Amino acid sequence: MPNHFIEPHKGKLLVLTPGMGAVATTFMAGVISARKNLSKPFGSLTQLQTIRLGARSNQRNPLIKDFIDLAGLDDIVFGGWDVISDNAYEAAKRADVLKPQDLEPLKDELGSVQPMKAAFNQKYVKLLKGENIKPLTNKWELAEALREDIRNKISETGASRAVMIWCGSTEVHLHPSACHQSIEAFEKGLKNSDEAIAPSQLYAYAAIKEGVPYANGAPNLSADFPALEQLAEQEKVPIAGKDFKTGQTLMKTILAPGFKTRMLGIRGWFSTNILGNRDGEVLDDPDSFKSKEVSKTGVLDSILQPDEYPDLYKDLYHKVRINYYPPRGDAKEGWDNIDIFGWMGYDMQIKVDFLCRDSILAAPIVLDLALFLDFAKRAGKSGIQEWLSFYFKSPQVNTGHIPEHDIFIQHLRLKNSLRVLGGEEPITHLSENF
Ligand SMILES: NC(=O)c1ccc[n+]([C@@H]2O[C@H](COP(=O)([O-])OP(=O)(O)OC[C@H]3O[C@@H](n4cnc5c(N)ncnc54)[C@H](O)[C@@H]3O)[C@@H](O)[C@H]2O)c1
């Protein structure tokens, strides 16, 4: 395979997060902690996973980070925006994901990350209030102000380039409207402060205009509509989304392909969660929950293909609930009751009780997306990066493409994309005699 030209990484990489809450600060803390050798970056493919090259017998299994030219943890600098003015140390303390003994050694570095004033409007996140907000109201001016923030932060931190990962609250569910259909319509919409344009779209627009790759970690409409997809192609910027695949959906996309592989039927899949962090509070608003529900429920249909396998999956009853329950904080509990059936239609049940930590699962995704998107940009890739579907509950795909939710297929695609970009053959797992 020919080697793709990849601009070597040089200088600092600024990772910008709109939203400096539980996920963003846990990500920052983990990177700093790993740099100090206080912990290992578990959960991160870019840091820990190997990649097989060629036949198994060749035994070429370098670490991904040794195979392709990724920025290192030492190259990363942080920046962010939040409607609350706490610095990253204070915000991490308040998020209560990490123990004080793990946060204290990181206090100076985290404390130096001060949130920039947010582009925010409560109409789009009803259960959130804050004071660290840009006083502007016109959306075009807000987008311009965000662009200026990006430029300033790059020069202030001495970074050579940046990536942006939306770690802000889930906004209300919006459908793409007329202003989302072309770049011109969107820019006109910005100037007219069109109601259909939510703040996360302002950040996405600002990032793409500044040549900064953008990923959306939340389920709301942000860069997944024609105007910004076209803009990303035009500006040669990679984008990806949406909604980090953690917790219950991670479990679903691990389990469901297994049932389907064995041709086991499913009558029902009931999923309920209790969580008490701010994300849970925001999701208590039905409009924000709607965004989440849409992104969570599509997963099973796509993996199980009920149209292809009507006897097995056509009548599957899928229900998802999120309950805000403050005593739990970030330590979420997700129950799944799965009613499956097998030979001669006999029923079986599986119960999964996942005592997970959402932000602990999400933080390495932020790191991997930041490093892979920066790599993609240097490799000359632009627009939607479908090979990063692995990280998302609702993978963003090009028009006409069908999103893939099966985590094992997503993983194969991710690694084969890396192999090809690194000048190696993709792996089919076939040998000469099958
Ligand atoms: N934790 C997970 O496993 C997980 C998984 C999938 C998706 N997500 C999504 O990631 C996002 C972050 O999750 P979290 O647990 O860190 O939530 P959080 O509530 O702790 O943090 C979100 C932060 O975003 C800020 N914010 C909201 N609107 C903003 C704006 N316009 N500009 C700047 N800041 C803004 C809030 O003030 C808050 O501090 C949420 O949308 C969540 O749904 C999280």
Image (cartoon, rainbow, N blue to C red):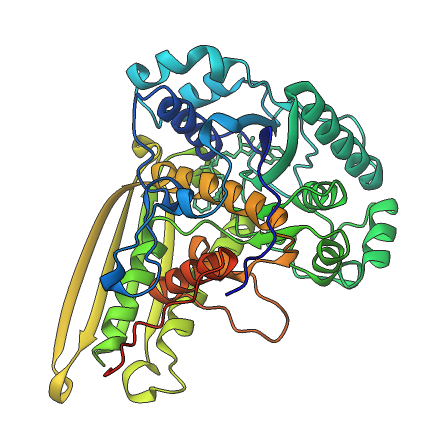
Q: Quadrant of residue 300?
A: bottom left
Q: Residue 258 appears at what percent x and percent y?
A: 24, 69
- The structure residue drawn at horizontal position 56% and vertical position 26%, both measured from the top left corner, is 78
Residue 127, relative to residue 187: is it above or below?
Answer: above
Q: Position of residue 21 (x, y in %)?
A: 49, 30
**Number of numbered discs overlaid on the protein picture:** 0
Q: Is residue 37 left or right of residue 283?
A: left
Depicted 114 relative to depicted 402: above or below: above
Residue nearest the observer in this picture, 72 or 86: 72
Does residue 222 appear in this view? Answer: no
Give residue 227's position: percent from left, percent from top. 75, 59
Q: Residue at x 59, y 26 (%)?
A: 79
Quarter of the rendering containing residue 262:
bottom left
In the displayed structure image, the side of residue 2 where residue 46 appears, left or right: left
Q: Position of residue 434 (x, y in %)?
A: 24, 82
Instruction: Classify residue 100 by image quadrant.
Output: top left
Q: Is residue 351 above or below residue 211?
A: below
Which residue is more in the foreground, 369 or 221?
369
Please tell me which residue is depicted at 38% across the width and 37% down the height of the picture.
Answer: 359
Q: Is residue 266 above or below residue 92?
A: below
Q: Is residue 211 visible?
A: yes
Residue at (32%, 49%) from the top-left corner?
50
In this rendered view, identify the residue nearer to me: 74 or 404.
74
